[in-house]
Amino acid sequence: MRVSACVIARDDARNIRRCLESLAWADERIVVVDERSRDATESIATELGARVIRHPYRGNLEQKNFALEQARGDWVVALDADESLSPQLAEALRAELGAAGDCEGIEVNRVTYHLGRWIRHGDFHPDWQLRAFRRGRGEWVGANPHGRVRVPGAVRRVTGDCEHRSYADLSDQLARVQEWSRIEAERLQREGRRARLRDLVLRPPARFLRAYLLKAGFLDGVPGFAIAAITAFHVFVKYAKLWELERAPR
């Protein structure tokens, strides 16, 4: 059994070393670098022995599926550059791959480090993600900028943390909100969705209450409150941008 690790990256010099070192046990490590990348991501990945491919970015799902096409192993472990396997998870995953039987996919629980602490409540956790699967049986599906891996067969879960360091700080998170909400609003428009007043008035506070109260985000202190508030803002901006697109000159 051979294992291929597939990672996509753009300007991820801050995280790529940690990601690839957590995958050092894989038989091959493939890093697909967005051609727009301008930092040391590519040189760090090359230094660590990964096979680096520069590829034009057409979308998050398209880039990840391109990376899967480069894999040669029996199993694929697919991570983002800002994700890494804790030692406990790496050990559990290797053991599970060695005794997978008829299993076709394995889910791991992702935990995000943000605002000085690991976030273990609210919308951020638990966050089960299918990150290992038999080559040729899994593909990235869904809608940009976020998608999921789909496999046709049985899926298992393993213990341990998939450590996620998505945001450098609040400014970085807000910048992502701006980018992602634009992509999401454009997709909704293509699907024929329209922004209604109740989307702007009701959806943001409902998302805040879900994250902060129903999913116990308050247990993460001030970071939990900030994350719930920004998540609600994300929902508002998405529908506000959809409303704006509806009124833009064609």
Image: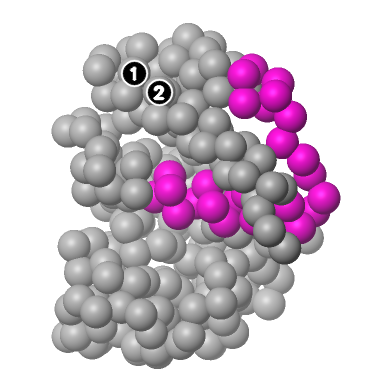
Seen in the image, is 235 located left or right of residue 218?
A: right
Q: Amino acid at mark 1?
A: Phe
- Closest to the observer, 127 or 12: 12
Instruction: Identify the residue at the far right of this view.
Output: 192
Q: Amino acid at mark 2?
A: Ala
Where 5 falls versus 73 (above or below)? above
- Closest to the observer, 106 or 18: 18
Q: Are marks 2 and 1 in contact (CB under 8 Å)?
A: yes
Place of residue 166 in the rendered image (x, y in percent of width and height, measured from the top left): 33, 50
Q: Is residue 188 magenta?
A: yes
- Asked whether residue 140 is in view, the answer is yes
Majority SS type along the magenta span? helix
Place of residue 98 in the rendered image (x, y in percent of width and height, measured from the top left): 51, 65
Give the CA separation, mark 2 to mark 1. 6 Å
- Closest to the observer, 131 or 106: 131
Q: Bounds of the magenta span? A: 176-202
- Closest to the observer, 214 or 130: 214
Crowding near pointer 1: few (<14 within 10 Å), some, many (20+)? some
Q: Which residue is mark 2?
A: 229
In which image quadrant can residue 44 be found? Answer: bottom left
Q: What's the residue at 34%, 18% (across, down)?
A: 225
Q: What's the residue at 56%, 77% (across, down)?
A: 58
Q: Is residue 29 magenta?
A: no
Q: What's the residue at 48%, 66% (across, down)?
A: 78
Q: Which residue is mark 1?
A: 225
Where 50 falls versus 78 (above or below)? below
- Asked whether residue 48 is in view, the answer is no
